[in-house]
Image (cartoon, grey):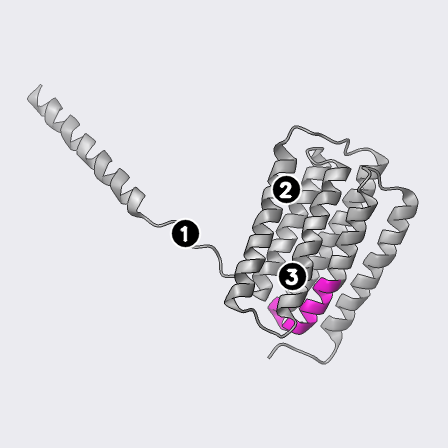
Amino acid sequence: MKTSLIAAAVSATLALLTGAAMAQTPAAPAAPVTAQTTVQRDVNQQQRIENGLQSGKITTREAGQLERDEAKVDRLQAKDMKDGKLSPAERRQLRAAQNKASRDIKTAETNGVNGNPLSASSQRMQADVQRNVNQEKRVENGLQSGALTKREAAGLERGQAHVDGAEAHAAADGNVGAGEQKRLQHAENRQSARIHHAKTNAKTAG
């Protein structure tokens, strides 16, 4: 009996010490905001919107609202990276904008308002958002490889802001029509050509 009581006391003490140690362990610091990591986050957030559309957790109208958030982030990136660097204040500003966009995506995913992923409108929006994922990946890969400078990436994010804003406008009424998608595809094709040109010109990150 005495042995059992001692063992129980030792276990309780260890549990308390472990809990105290865990409480004192600081949370892992957020990844530093760089040109590459902020564009990588664009990729991730666009993919979350795409996944939500495909599952029906995000409606076409909600996707449009989320693309408005993404357009704001893109415009910030274009402004902040145009001089080839990010100041501490600019890093904080970008993190805050992307955190807000992330929260808005989470709300859209969990608010119980569902869409029909098989509808023509959702299918069109899915195609457009998937294109966003692909284009942002190309920008991120260009930054990673050195094929794109930060200034070039800034210009490309300005173009992506235009695309995202156009998608937000098209989806504002909850329906993306065939004519609207045709105009969106034209803007997406222009953006794709800009990315290709920037990645294949003589400029490289030094």
Label 2: few (<14), some (14–19) or many (≥20) C-alpha neighbours in 10 Å: many
Relative to the observer, which residue lies in front, 127 or 145?
A: 127
Q: Check if residue 29 falls in the magenta segment.
A: no
Mark 3 highlights which residue? 76
161 relative to 31 in the view: left or right: right
Mark 1 highlights which residue? 28
Mark 2 highlights which residue? 105
Depicted 20 relative to depicted 198: above or below:
above
Residue 139 location (% of width, % of height): 68, 63
Relative to the observer, which residue lies in front, 21 or 118?
A: 21
- Mark 1 residue element: loop
Q: CA–CA distance between discs 2 and 1? A: 23 Å
Kindly identify the residue that appears in the image at 7 percent across and 22 percent down: 2
Depicted 154 relative to depicted 129: above or below:
below
Q: Check if residue 156 falls in the magenta segment.
A: yes
Amino acid type of disc 3? Leu
- Mark 3 residue element: helix
Which residue in the rendered view is the most extreme toward the top?
A: 1
Mark 3, mark 1: which one is toward the viewer? 3
**Which is nearer the N-term, disc 2 or disc 1?**
1
Which residue in the rendered view is the most extreme toward the right?
A: 179
Mark 2, mark 3: which one is toward the viewer? 3
Label 1: few (<14), some (14–19) or many (≥20) C-alpha neighbours in 10 Å: few
Q: Does residue 129 appear anywhere in the picture?
A: yes
